[in-house]
Image (spheres, rainbow, N blue to C red):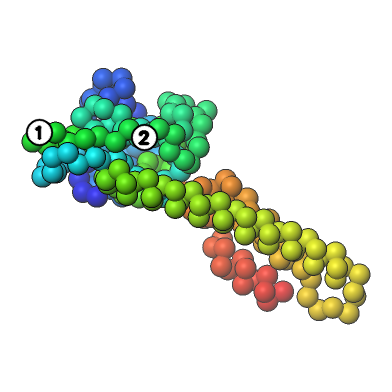
Amino acid sequence: NGEWNFYYNQWIVTDKDDSLTGKIILPNHWNDVFDISKNGYASYKIKIDGLKKNTCLSVVLNNFRGSYRAFINDVLVASSGKLSKTNDNYVSGYVDYKNPYRVNDEVSLELVLEIGYNTFGGFYSSPWLTTEKFSSNTSSLSNIIHFITIIMIGALVCLSIILFFVYKGLKNYDYSFVYDFLFGIFLMFNQIFCKDGSLLITRLNLLDYRIIYFLILLH
């Protein structure tokens, strides 16, 4: 975290364009700091001092599911997804490229993050500057958790379907499993389409999901 130089609608390493927009502290949405749209692409830059020689560095953004590139002293160290300046960019949610940076005799390092077009105002979590080993472990753990979550939600949906048809013909049963089924479907689509961990309902500015689930239970 800390104060970064911010460049709206610029990729300062890729395009060699560095007209400073202002300063921003991460984590933060750029539209909460500047009077600009939350849609767009950008670059962030910060200087880092005091690193030990021969340390192999990498960048981790485990909670971020957009497309980005990370550079240390203009050397590409990590990237995720296919970056674009328009809304047709491909978002993978997984790191596609890793190339750890070895610290030599530099007095300071310059870390630059380029983010592809997005509709949520940039990075909503702080990037981690880590060692190569730590980066590999955390990335693998993140992917495993994401996979397990989808499997569990899929199992919930399958169970809801089975229970729905089992109890469909029982008129004297007080509870309908159609609510479990619909709630399971919602969770599955939420995990697939909102890979940043947010909820579709909150992203669409609808009622809080806890209120809706409470109303379902009352019904």
Is 20 placed above or below 128 here? above
Q: Residue at x 8, y 36 (%)?
A: 107
State the residue at coordinates (31%, 20%).
15
Name the residue nearer the viewer: 102 or 36.
Answer: 102
Residue nearest the observer in this picture, 110 or 26: 110
Local secondary structure at mark 2: strand
Query: Which label's residue is closer to the chain start, 2 or 1?
Result: 2
Residue 102 as seen in the image, left or right of residue 208: left
Residue under the point 36% across and 34% down: 98
Task: Evaluate whether residue 87 shows in this view.
Answer: no
As drawn, 68 above or below 12: below
Going by the numbered disc 1, the residue's amino acid type is: Asp
Q: Are marks 2 and 1 in contact (CB under 8 Å)?
A: no
User: Which mark is on residue 98?
Assistant: 2
Q: Is residue 58 visible?
A: yes
* Label 1: which secondary element: loop
Decide: few, some or many residues near mark 1? Use Cα within 10 Å; few <14, some 14-19, many ≥20: few
For mark 1, what is the residue? 105
Amino acid, disc 2? Lys
Write down the quadrant of residue 17 in the picture: top left
